Amino acid sequence: MSLLNHYLGDERDRANASKRRGGKVLISLDEQTDENLLSQEPASCLSPEREFDKRWAAALLQHAMARLREEFETSGKGRTFDRLKLFLEGEASSGDYAAMAAGLGMSANAIAVSVHRLRQRYRELVRIEVANTVGSPDEVDDEMRHLFSVLAQ
């Protein structure tokens, strides 16, 4: 019976996720190679500097996400990460935590706390990645502001 409950929870989560996406097709960055991603990108009218910044920002975020995934997998919580990472992209709608809680065998409050901690750790890892790109710790805050401005464009 437990397997059936997990399966039904997974299916419910998938259905809710598709509702949140509004019918948009998502491309998994985890399953794409760099060459495949480049071939799917439209021609850019951005300056080479802005194009570089956008790619730098995307690579930095992707690396931080990979480190976060690795941390979860190392602690045996890879499945939990795969489910919770949906909430890194935006705020949860009413009932999202409760729907996910059933599939993970957790309470909605435990999901909310886990999402908060996941976001907090992701921010820390992004900051670490940014720190790795600058010459001194004094430059991290400026580089973080630059990252956010690039992402806002």
Image: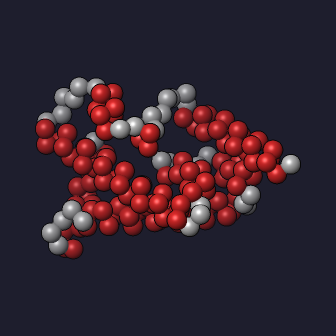
Question: 143 left or right of 109?
Answer: left
Q: Of all residues shown, which one is farthest toward the right?
A: 1
Q: Residue at x 35, y 55 (%)?
A: 63
Q: Position of residue 144 (x, y in %)?
A: 27, 60
Q: Residue at x 15, y 69 (%)?
A: 135
Query: What kind of colouring is applied to the model shown?
Result: secondary structure
Q: Residue at x 44, y 39 (%)?
A: 31
Taking depth in this image into account, of 22 and 4 the one nearest to the observer is 4
Quadrant position of the C terminus in the picture? top left
Taking depth in this image into account, of 21 and 72 the one nearest to the observer is 72
Number of marks in the rendered image: 0
Question: 23 left or right of 121?
Answer: right
Q: Position of residue 85 (x, y in %)?
A: 53, 51
Q: Identify whether 126 is placed above or below 137.
A: above
Question: 78 left or right of 95?
Answer: left
| Residue 113 can be seen in this image | yes
Q: Position of residue 137 (x, y in %)?
A: 21, 74
Q: Quadrant of residue 9?
A: top right
Q: Residue at x 18, y 65 (%)?
A: 134
Q: Position of residue 61 (x, y in %)?
A: 35, 52
| Residue 95 can be seen in this image | no
Q: Identify whether 88 is placed above or below 110.
A: above
Q: Quadrant of residue 54?
A: top left
Q: Of all residues shown, which one is farthest toward the bottom?
A: 137
